Image (spheres, rainbow, N blue to C red):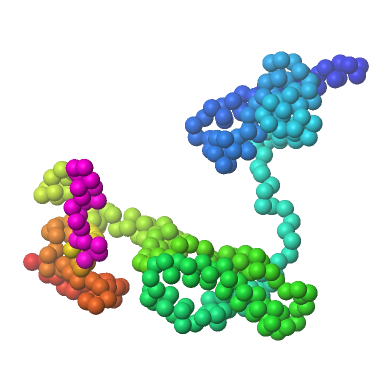
Amino acid sequence: MSYRVQRAEKRAARILDFTAALKDIDKMIQSKKTKFVSGPHGLQARRALAIRSHLRLVVKNGRFSIDASMRAAESHGFAAKWGGRNLRSWTRNWTRNCALPHSLRGQHAKVYTLLSDPTVAAELRAYVRSNKWAMNPDKLRQFSKNELIPDVADKYLRHLVREEMPRGLKKYMDVELFPRIHLQVGRGISLSTARCWLRWEGFRFISHKKGLYFDGHDRPDVLSYRQNEFLPTMKCHKPGLVHYSVGNVETELAIQPQNYVERRLVLCAHDEMTAQAHDTNEKSWVLEDQHALRKKGVGRGLHKSDVICSTFGWLKDASQTLEYGKNYEGYWTGELFVKQVTFLLPFLAYKVIY
């Protein structure tokens, strides 16, 4: 078989492969289930469109692969030569494996940092989480207890994050930590490096907030417990729960039990709410900017913790009300919730038996 015939057969086989690859990438791009990294306008989506253009120029327009790749790369914002060379590599990978190229950002070799040393990282973490770096301990105490007015507190927070903590950290690293671990550093670390390390440890430069609230629902350990323990356990208990018909809570559904040994389970939902004395609507109808006078503060507040039983409804006797505040009854804590549940258990047992 002559060389020309062999080359023609290889080109025909390549065209068949490109045709199948073009159909696959058309389906993938048009599918609503496809999710590109960084969205439909990200780098991976642009590369996918460039691969499709390259395949179309070869299959439908009859152009050679090199010429088609250069034209397709340039039309999608890549360099003609270097982008065309990369595009041919992406097309080969798609034709063989049906896999889109992934960005190598963040995967290259990094310069060694001192935080990679476990000893340095542990010492740094222990020092930063203490208050030894404070240049003015008394002012730091006032700031921690919210005894500063908002403007002064915000100004001090900026000075704290930008000046005191980085300078204190730099001095500690240069004078104490490096000599202790026998590490010789010429000029020590700069203030910008100290700020980077503070961000590494979770510190943020934010505005002062007088009232702090930590949700915690999105913490990794909370999510892991919810997905791996709580939800599977509730799914196991679901067949034993008491069910009612939709729209008619008085009619209980007759469900055949799995066995007659285990007792039926009753779902009790718990919820909390707070209300302030000066609560009102945020918006109101106003004539010619004649606003009604309102109190500056929110006023005294009430915290209410209630339980709703799927069988008996609102358990009024188990309700707990707290006039919260520093100078009143304090704040709702986990210990108070445990006391409420402890009081609730005998009440539920009485209701179920009688």
Question: Does residue 128 show up magenta in the picture?
Answer: no
Is 291 positioned to the left or the right of 9 in the image? left
Residue 264 location (% of width, % of height): 21, 60
Residue shown at the point (13%, 45%) measured from the top left:
248
Q: Can residue 349 be seen by looking at this rendering?
A: no
For the C terminus, give its image quadrant.
Answer: bottom left
Residue 60 location (% of width, % of height): 69, 16
In this view, 228 is above or below 91: below
Is 354 positioned to the left or the right of 167 in the image? left
Residue shown at the point (76%, 73%) measured from the top left:
187
Question: Does residue 281 show up magenta in the picture?
Answer: yes
Is 14 positioned to the left or the right of 141 in the image? right
Residue most toward the right? 2
In the foreground, 248 or 51:
51
Residue shown at the point (35%, 67%) measured from the top left:
211
* Stretch in magenta: 278-299
For the N terminus, give its image quadrant.
Answer: top right
Residue 199 location (% of width, % of height): 57, 64
In this view, 86 is above or below 219: above
Is 156 positioned to the left or the right of 189 in the image? left
